[in-house]
Amino acid sequence: MVMSASTRPKITASELSRRHRFLVLAICCASIVVVVMDISIVNVALSAIRRDLHASVSGLQWTVDAYTLVLASFLVLAGSTADRVGRRRIFQVGLAAFGLGSLLCGLAPSIDWLIAARALQAVGGTMLNPVAMAITANTFPDPAERARAIGVFGSMSGLSLALGPILGGALVDAFGWRSIFWINVPIVAVAILCTALFVPESRAARARRFDPVGQTLMILVLGSVVYAIIESKGLGWTSPIILGLLAVAVLGVVGILGYESRRVDPLLELRLFRSVPFSAAIVMALFALCGFGAFLFVTTQYLQDVRGMSALTAGLCLLPVGVLVLVLSPLTGRLVGASGPRLPLVISGAALALGGGASIWLEPTTPLLALLAIYLLFGVFLGTVNPPITNTAVSGMPRSMAGVATSLASAGRQTGTTLGVAIAGTTVGSALARGGTAYTNAAHGLWWLVFGLGVGILALGLLSTGRWAVDTARRAAALFEEVDTGAAAVPARSVPARGNA
C-alpha cells in the first residue's frame, strides 16, 4: 500500500542515494520534454490546423505565441512561488494543469478555443520548466555532479525542441493534428504519480513575498510588444493602437526598473543582473530561441506549403537537427562541466550565424541535400547552446536563488521564442498564400535577423566568460548570501516584514 504524502517519511536531497537522485532527474526531464516539445511540435501541425479550423496567419501565430507568451510572463512567479510554498507541490499542480490544457487543445472546435486551451496548457507549463530545474539543482548538492545534471536537463530542452517537428509530423499524418496534444495526457499522468512517490519536497531557505505589481508590469510589457508585432502587419506601425501598445511597453519597463529596485523581494530580481555572466545568459537565451523559433515557424511552412511535403516528410527533413542535438548536447554538457561555457557558446553562435546566412539563398527548388546541409548548421547551434546558457545562469549563485535565476533564464527563452514567431509570421505571413519565390523572398529579412542573432551570441559568449565577468558573478553571489543571512541593509522604502504586498 502506497503511503500518503502526510505519512511518508520526509527525505532531504542530501539523504538521497545516487540512484534516487537520477530518478528525480529523469522525472524532471520528462516534464521538460512535454513542455518544451509543445513549443515546437505544434509548428509542423500548423498547415493542418489552418485547413481544418480555417485559421488566418495571425491565428497560427497566436496558436504558438499564446503558449510561449504565458510561459514567459509567469515563469518567474512560478519559480519564486515554488521556492516559497514547496517545489514538489507546485510541480504537481503544474502537471495537472498542463494535462488538462492538452486534453482541451485536442478537443478545440475552433482556432479561438485552441488558443485559449494553449494558454491554459502554458499556465501548467510555467510551474514545470523552472521548478523542475530548481528541483534538479537542489537534488544534486555536489557542484560537479550538479553541473552534469544541469547539462543533462538543458540537453533535454534542446532535444525536445528539435524532435518536436519529427514526432509531430508522424502523429499528424497518422492520427491528425489533435493527437499531438492528446499524447501528453498519459505522460503527465505517469509523471504526477512518480513525483508523489519519489521527488522530495524542498523550499528556499528564505521565502520570497508575492509581487503583484511586478507581475502585472511584466505581463503588460511582454503582451504589448508581442501583440504590436503580430498585429502590425494588418494595422501598420503608425496605427494609434500599435503606437499605444509600444508606449505601454516602454512605460512598463520604466515602472519595472523604478519599482522592483526598491523591493526586498522583487519578482524580477534586478540584483542578479549585476552578474555579467547571468545577464549575458538571459540575452543569449532570448537571442537563441528567437532565432530558432523563427526558423521553425518559417521552415515547417516552407517545407509543406512551398515544397508540397507531407507533415511527416517535413518533420524528417528536420531530422539532422534532432540527431545533432542528441549527439552534441550530452557532450556539450560534459564540456561545460569540465572546462566552462566559452567554446560551446562560440560554436553555437557561429553555427546560427552561418545557418541564417546560408538560408538567405533558399529557393522553392533548392536541392534537398543543400537544404539538409543548412539544417545541420541549425542542429549544431541547438546542440551546443542550451547547456552553457543554463549553467551560466545558475553558476556561482546560492541555491536559495535557484528558482528565481532559472525562472529568469527560462523566461528569456520563452520570450525569445515568442518574439521569433511573432516576427516570422509578420515577415512572411502575407506571402504564404502566394507561395513559391514570393515566400522565400519575403523570408530574406528574417534570415538576416537570424544571422545577426548568431553573431550576438558569439560576442556575448566571449564577453561573459572572461575574468572580469566572472568577478562580477562572484560579487553578485556574495550579495545574495548577505541578504539571506540578514547582513545586508534593508532599503529605506522596502516592503514591511509582514504581509504579501
Image: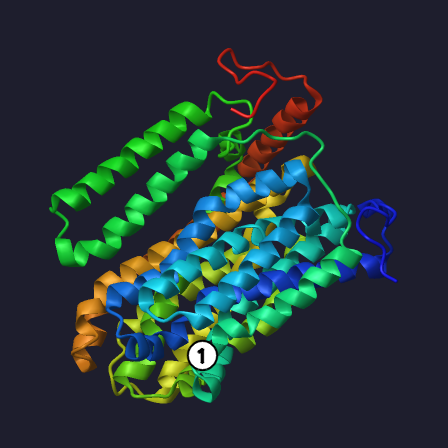
The answer to which of 429 and 8 lies nearer the viewer is 8
The answer to whether any part of residue 240 appears in the image is: yes
Depicted 439 relative to depicted 115: above or below: below
Quadrant where the image shows the N terminus: bottom right
Depicted 433 relative to depicted 484: above or below: below
Residue 270 position, x and y percent, is 49, 31
**Left or right side of 150 for 60:** left
The answer to whether any part of residue 340 appears in the image is: no
Judged from the image, the secondary structure of the residue bearing numbered disc 1 is: loop
Residue positioned 44% across, 67% down in the render: 105
Which image quarter: residue 218? top left
**Left or right side of 214 for 399:** right
Crowd band around label 1 with a 10 angstrom C-alpha radius: few (<14), some (14–19), many (20+): many
The answer to which of 171 and 300 lies nearer the viewer is 171
Which image quarter: residue 482? top right
Residue 224 position, x and y percent, is 29, 44
Badge count: 1
Identify which amino acid the numbered label 1 is placed on: Leu
Residue 207 position, x and y percent, is 65, 30
Residue positioned 20% across, 82% down in the render: 436
Residue positioned 32% across, 79% down in the render: 52
The answer to which of 333 and 78 lies nearer the viewer is 78
What residue sits right under mark 1 in the picture? 318
**Left or right side of 414 for 143:** right
